[in-house]
Image: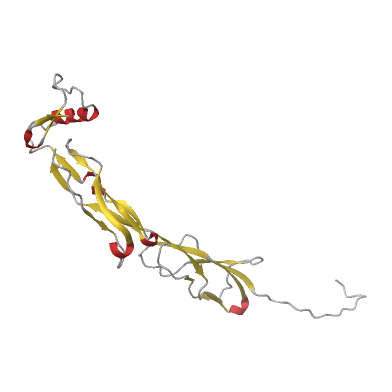
Amino acid sequence: VSDVGYTFAYVNGQLTVVPRPVTIAADAGQTKIYGDPNPAAYTYTVTGGPGTTGSAIVPGDSISGALARVAGENVGSYAINQGSVAISPAVDYNVTYVGNNFVITPATLQYVADPVSVQAFAPLPSFTGSVTGFKGADNLGNATTGTPIFSTTVSNTFVPGAYPIWGAGLTANNGNYIFAQALGNATAFDVAASGQGEEIGAVWAQRIKRCRDDAFAYAAPYDTLPCTLPQEGGERSGV
């Protein structure tokens, strides 16, 4: 602009630098299993607020400190708070903190059945087992309520085979555990055909199954005879 015909006067102004808006947000999905150590640090994400460009924190400035959470070690959800996390120099930033939750999930206890083997037609035995997977100083007495019970799904030993022994009877205090069956429980009860004579073999297994379904049936291979079942000592009796 030409200064011909003009007179210029300068009026001082003022540039105001306001604190830089920054959001510190605790990350979602932070969790652990009951009884495990807490993480070394709770994680977070730093983003620039409205109107900012470039990196969230001006180069040369720094962020330090650690998030903290509400105390507690039982299963549940615990708030993660800002703790000591701060940006330096603090005067240059307007920090907004967005919290999240730290979740403790149940550990797993297993019912482990003691394997049992009996001969066919023997009385049902008593079943025993143990419970494994307790964390730290936990045990049956202080971490669970109830009494562990082990039982099978069959009511007699007429048919040889492998049967399950399942554990039950417990609940976890504070919901700190869930319960599962050990893999071996599915076949822990063995009913053996050997040792009872030739008559307790595949033929008798077929007859016994049919007799269970119909006590008055005629069962192959002796279709002219009604169902009969061996008793202890090798004797036979009608169903």
- Residue 45 located left or right of residue 177: right
Residue at x 15%, y 20% (from the top left corner): 223
- Position of the C terminus, as image quadrant, is top left
- Residue 129 located left or right of residue 75: left
- Residue 1 located left or right of residue 217: right
Q: Position of residue 63 (x, y in %)?
A: 53, 74
- Residue 127 located left or right of residue 179: left
Q: Compared with residue 48, is residue 204 higher up or lower down, i.e. above or below? A: above
Residue 86 seen anywhere in this rendered image of the structure: yes
Q: Position of residue 111 (x, y in %)?
A: 27, 53
Residue pushed farthest front?
A: 238
Q: Quadrant of residue 119?
A: top left
Q: Position of residue 189 (x, y in %)?
A: 19, 44
Colour style of the rendered protein structure:
secondary structure
Q: Quadrant of residue 214?
A: top left
Q: Position of residue 59 (x, y in %)?
A: 56, 73
Residue pushed farthest top?
A: 224
Q: Compared with residue 234, is residue 170 higher up or lower down, i.e. above or below? A: below
Depth check, front residue: 43 or 59: 43
The number of discs equals 0
Depth check, front residue: 123 or 112: 123
Residue at x 49%, y 75% (from the top left corner): 65
- Position of the N terminus, as image quadrant, is bottom right
Q: Compared with residue 2, is residue 202 higher up or lower down, i.e. above or below? A: above
Q: Compared with residue 192, is residue 137 higher up or lower down, i.e. above or below? A: below
Residue 139 seen anywhere in this rendered image of the structure: no
Depth check, front residue: 204 or 188: 204
